[in-house]
């Protein structure tokens, strides 16, 4: 657990991190990407951290990969590449820098390390876990294999390295249907997200069986709440992540991965949109889509929100919070992740 007092005292010895309106004004180009959702006062607070991080990235030969659920100050201020799990996994195989800082949760940092065993991978807070990833173990994979002999195991990237190593191939929410359909067996095991599996099953010709895990953010959405909201705002477009229950997805005008959601909103530019996913999604694309009124409510991921600007700076400054994966586990997990990437490229996903 972070000792915030010591961390802040340590940073104060090396950086002037007091709110700085003048510095903030000099970084107007970055602020323009988020000024619809970040107040001038908050930007004056964030600007010293953003400036320090961007300078330190050059010194450390570091790159920041940030998931679409990161807060706007990270997403727009310091990230070098942003995207969903598939996009970040692919980008992790392409970066030239020696250090990767993962703006996301622990399994994402593990994936970057699996794909780059020779690089230093940092996660600004090792406690940034994932309820979905923690819902299954390698023993759970073996339990499913025993129930369905010969069926391939397709595991969501939202899993630990050990689970990936025990799986045949990985998938993300953007390629799950295509990956499942590409399996030769009539029965396919999906782990650990029961709702993603059910949503895939509704569109696939395969017999999809699944592990009963779920995401604490997406399982909280209810179909009746969406129907009630649509009655109040009839012209709203509801866009849901496939980690939501099928009854919720059935109420949506579109369902897709975080990158798919972003593309759909940018392509269609609805007057009003409700993104049925993690809170930061709408904030991160609001400024580039001023014609869209993003509706609330949303649900916040407490794990994603453990990653903050000051923790990113501390991790880069001290080169701590490094992620390690056992080489034997890493080698097996890499096969499952690389199969996903290769198949996605082949299928043009």
Image (cartoon, rainbow, N blue to C red):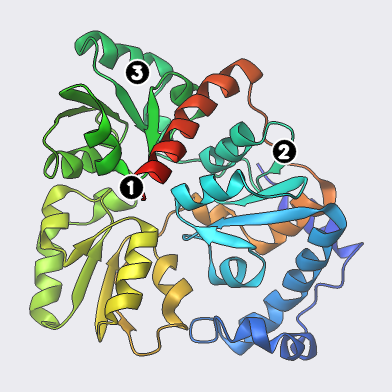
Residue sitting at the far front? 346
Q: State how far apart marks 2 and 1 are (Cα).
A: 27 Å
The local secondary structure at tag 2 comes to loop
- State the image coordinates of residue 230 (x, y, percent, origin top left): 12, 75
Mark 2 Cα within 10 Å, few/some/many (few <14, many 20+)?
Answer: some
The local secondary structure at tag 1 comes to loop
Mark 3 Cα within 10 Å, few/some/many (few <14, many 20+)?
Answer: many
**Circle nearer the N terminus (3, 2):** 3
**Circle nearer the N terminus (2, 1):** 1
Q: In this view, does 318 lie above or below 212?
A: below
Quadrant of residue 259 in the image?
Answer: bottom left
Q: Which residue has dot 2 on it?
A: 322
Q: In the image, what residue occupies the spot 59% across and 24% down?
A: 330
Mark 1 vs 3: CB contact within 8 A: no
**Circle nearer the N terminus (1, 3):** 3
- Return the residue nearer the eye: 319 or 88: 88
Q: In the image, what residue occupies the spot 80% across and 77% down?
A: 18
Quadrant of residue 81 in the image?
Answer: bottom right
- State the image coordinates of residue 329 (x, y, percent, origin top left): 57, 19
In the rendered image, is residue 116 in sight?
yes
The local secondary structure at tag 3 comes to helix
Q: In the image, what residue occupies the spot 26% across and 28% down?
A: 183
Q: Which residue has dot 1 on it?
A: 173
Q: Is residue 153 above or below residue 74?
A: above
């Amino acid at each position: 657990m972070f000792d915030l007092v010591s961390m802040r005292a340590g940073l104060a010895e090396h950086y002037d991190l007091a709110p700085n309106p003048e510095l903030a004004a000099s970084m107007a180009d970055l602020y323009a990407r988020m000024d619809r959702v970040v107040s001038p006062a908050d930007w004056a607070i964030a600007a010293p951290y953003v400036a320090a991080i961007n300078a330190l990235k050059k010194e450390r030969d570091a790159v920041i990969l940030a998931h679409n659920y990161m807060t706007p100050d990270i997403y727009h201020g310091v990230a070098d590449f942003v995207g969903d799990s598939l996009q970040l996994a692919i980008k992790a195989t392409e970066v030239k820098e020696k250090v990767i800082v993962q703006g996301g949760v622990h399994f994402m940092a593990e994936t970057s390390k699996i794909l780059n065993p020779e690089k230093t991978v940092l996660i600004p807070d090792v406690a940034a876990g994932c309820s979905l990833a923690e819902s299954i173990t390698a023993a759970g994979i073996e339990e499913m294999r025993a129930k369905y002999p010969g069926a391939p195991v397709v595991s969501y990237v939202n899993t630990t390295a050990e689970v990936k190593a025990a799986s045949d191939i990985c998938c993300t929410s953007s390629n799950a249907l295509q990956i499942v359909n590409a399996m030769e067996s009539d029965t396919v095991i999906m782990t650990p997200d029961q709702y993603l599996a059910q949503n895939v099953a509704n569109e696939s010709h395969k017999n999809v069986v699944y592990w009963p895990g779920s995401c604490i953010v997406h399982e909280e959405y209810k179909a009746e709440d969406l129907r009630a909201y649509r009655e109040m705002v009839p012209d709203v477009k509801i866009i849901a992540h496939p980690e939501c229950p099928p009854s919720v997805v059935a109420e949506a005008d579109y369902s897709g991965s975080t990158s798919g959601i972003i593309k759909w909103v940018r392509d269609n530019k609805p007057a009003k949109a409700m993104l049925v996913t993690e809170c930061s999604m709408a904030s991160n694309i609001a400024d580039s889509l001023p014609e869209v009124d993003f509706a609330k409510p949303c649900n916040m991921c407490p794990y994603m929100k453990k990653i903050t600007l000051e923790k990113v700076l501390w991790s880069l400054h001290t080169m701590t919070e490094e992620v390690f994966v056992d080489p034997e586990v890493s080698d097996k997990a890499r096969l499952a992740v690389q199969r996903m990437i290769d198949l996605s490229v082949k299928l043009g996903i």
